[in-house]
Image: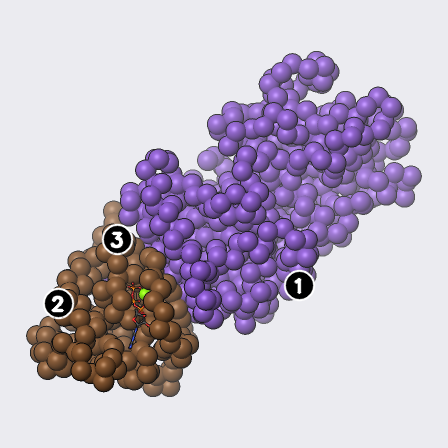
Chain colours: A purple, B brown
Amino acid sequence: MDSDPDTNGAPEPQLSEDELRLSYLSLEDSRHVPQGVRLERNGSLPADFYDAREDIKPDDVEASPPRMVTGGREGSSKGKIGLIEGLEMDGEAPPSPSSSGYAGERGSSGGSSGTVEAADGGERVLHDDWDKGKQRIDEDDTSASWRKRKKHFFVLSHSGKPIFSRYGDEHKLAGFSATLQAIISFVENGGDRIKFVRAGRHQVVFLVKGPIYLVCISCTEEPYEALRGQLELLYGQILVILTKSIDRCFVKNPKFDMAPLLGGTDAVFSSLIHSFGWNPATFLHAYTCLPLAYSTRQAAVAILQDVADSGVLFAILMCRHKVVSLVGAQKASLHPDDMLLLSNFILSTESFRTSEAFSPICLPHYNSMAFLYAYVHYLDVDTYLALLSTNSEGFYHLKECRIQIESVLVKSNVLCEVQKSILDGGLHVEDLPVDSSLRSGLPCPHPSQGRAGPSSMSDIGGPAGLWHFIYRSINLDQYVSSEFSSPLNSSRLHKRLYRAYQKLYVSMHDRQIGPHKTQFRRDENYVLLCWITQDFELYAAFDPLADKALAIKTCNRVCQWVRDLENEIFLFGGSPFSW
Amino acid sequence: MASRRRMLLKVIILGDSGVGKTSLMNQYVNKKFSNQYKATIGADFLTKEIQFEDRLFTLQIWDTAGQERFQSLGVAFYRGADCCVLVYDVNVMKSFDNLNNWREEFLIQASPSDPENFPFVVLGNKIDIDGGNSRVVSEKKARAWCASKGNIPYFETSAKEGFNVEAAFQCIAKNALKNEPEEEIYLPDTIDVSSGGRQQGSPSGCEC
Ligand SMILES: Nc1nc2c(ncn2[C@@H]2O[C@H](COP(=O)(O)OP(=O)(O)OP(=O)(O)O)[C@@H](O)[C@H]2O)c(=O)[nH]1
Ligand SMILES: [Mg+2]
């Protein structure tokens, strides 16, 4: 993937005027400062502004024949492409109603805006929709609605038996699943590995995990790395439920049909896939804390620490997907991805809400082969406690622990503080402390002192056109994200911003291009600024008309602000998070 | 776990090019037949839901290409099959002679755990042609071969007239099922904390 120097946002390793300006703002290494479309002095946009591409794209994105990329040895897989294309040529025959011909249909999804519109409707899932389990069970690969979906996820076995499909009934998709298996296994037999196929606007990403194959078909323009990361999480979620011991079943019996073992877990996967569009933890590999006064959080840590010393491996107190407090037994540490998968599992399993529960659970990064046993109990509608033990008979002990923890939490008022924090929300860009150079004299209230009254800026975000930011502390494996505010006030806009961050994340972490330290890009939607140091990563979105120098200055302020508040927005101590 | 779960059965159809594999499948799934020959490229996949003894099954049918150049696809297709259907044309001797090769190739590539008892079904197709006057393989000869290979069930079919097709696939489903191993309880490891619980799954591989 060569970067196109003309493309907006492409890294531009050339010293510029902006770079000189950057240096005084103490951005440490600004050798790669890519430039966005620059505003003219008179404030009008250059003519090519709206043509500015959003991202670096491979040169042959549109209307090119399907391109297969395998794990190297590109030359040797030539013949196979022919064969693979042959497989897809079923479209030549009169389409039989149950024949799988997804790829054969690629022409029809070429880019009529009608298609896009309709498909978006499917992706724009209402917030309380996903947790009801799988949608559109009646669809299969012959339905127009199914083909219009923007993003499919499939899991299948190495013999081509379907395990999971985001849309439609797995059994009705058995033919399609067989097609995927044939493609993957065929390349695999040649000692090669298929990574992705591009077909028009669609990208097909493959992930092979032993006998389990995962596939994403998407026309969302998310980068390959991001989609692959999502498949990794999907696989992780399978392990959470079944452990990697599942591989043995396939060794014993290649015909093994795994789908029944996942019975009743559709909601878990739907909710995870849904979170790819709203939860930055899915690509940041970090978790986030509920903002709380330092003393409140420490009180919660202390009581969890007590039970951890009594044979509980992990004690986790969470509010929705945010951590209130977390403690691990000696030397035990919890990977942020495991935490994401665990909390997704708990939040999407309805039965946990109705009564205390005890369930086997696997934390793939801790030990992918074995089950732990989780005691889960909701303390109120949003707040739940998960106690993990290695002992399959630990229920009564864990229950005792919970009773003890709960009484301390109630007595010390922690639960009330948690509820209060939910109401107050997290950081608001409008509250970013400013000085006169950024905006004329607004007071800069501390979030815990309550929000300032409506200001003249409140409907256009924070100072200097700041709309949103995410700050990720590298040492802590934690991030803090500002609340969404106007003009980012729909879930569609939130998702678009997260996808933009995700792209930024991928391009900043691309090893081939090298570790970028800063990146500035401007398109018709935002100015995006990313800054990475040894200690943190900052992602910020500004008004597309924002002034670059001011934006950079504002980023420095955000970092300072986060540092000032770190005792309230991050969890310190507890167990070491060294990975 | 729900006992009334639906099962998926993977069925592979093998045989020389032109013997009527695709036609049989089309007749079975879509109740259609065409005189026109369109060689299958690689493989084609069809699914059909069937009811058998009060339970619902999905047959995932892998219609493979008989042409030689596709035989390298091997393992990619055969792995994890529940049943293998061997088809020949009663009017073409060579297609019958080749059954043995198809069977052996399948057993090598798929390497099922119990090759002796792996469920095959043999179909002698195109019995309608010329009112049976052009046939060169007798039913007796075919049955003898099937008997010698561990009593493989045998059917004489016509994809064109839809003769015996339903019965043949009914038998295919039944045989695929018969071979289903007893369900085991799924039991992963438990962690022994004393030996430092946090270990990555050692890919020591084979447990059996
Ligand atoms: N008369 C008659 N013709 C048949 C019958 N079955 C198939 N045919 C014809 O035989 C030819 C080949 O049939 P196919 O089903 O395409 O053969 P195949 O085994 O799938 O061939 P490959 O895909 O090349 O492996 C076609 O012209 C069919 O119309 C049958 O039962 N009776
Ligand atoms: Mg055919």
Q: Are marks 3 and 2 on the same chain?
A: yes
Instruction: Quote the CA–CA distance across marks 1 and 2.
Output: 62 Å
Marks 3/2 in contact by CB < 8 Å: the verdict is no
Image coords of residue A124 (percent x, y)? 67, 57
Marks 3 and 2, Cα distance to the nearest angstrom? Answer: 19 Å
Q: What residue is rendered at 86% in x and 43% in y?
A: A459
Q: Residue at x 9, y 78 (%)?
A: B141
Identity, as a three-letter code, of the amino acid under mark 3: Arg
Disc 2 designates what residue?
Answer: B97
Residue A549 appears anywhere in the view = yes
**Which residue is at the front of the view, B111 or A266?**
B111
Is any atom of residue A256 visible in this view?
no
Residue at screen point 77% across, 34% down: A544
Q: Residue A222: image x %, image y %?
A: 58, 44
- 1 and 3 marks in contact (CB < 8 Å): no
Q: Mark 3 near ligand 1 (CB under 8 Å)?
A: no
Quadrant of the frame with the N terminus of chain B: bottom left
Q: For the point 65% across and 14% down, which residue is it? A: A15
Name the amino acid type tagged 1: Asp
In the rendering, at what x and y percent does residue B133 appear? 18, 82
Q: Which residue is mark 3?
A: B69
Regarding mark 2 in the picture, which secondary structure is present there? Answer: helix
Mark closest to the chain's N terminus, 3 or 2? 3
Give residue A359's quadrant in the image. bottom left
Residue B12's tag is none
Q: Quadrant of the C terminus of chain B?
A: bottom left
The disc label shown at residue A128, or none: 1
Contact between marks 1 and 2 (CB within 8 A): the answer is no
Check the image and report above or below for A124 versus A521: below
Q: Tell me if residue A182 comes above or below residue B51 in the rendering.
A: above
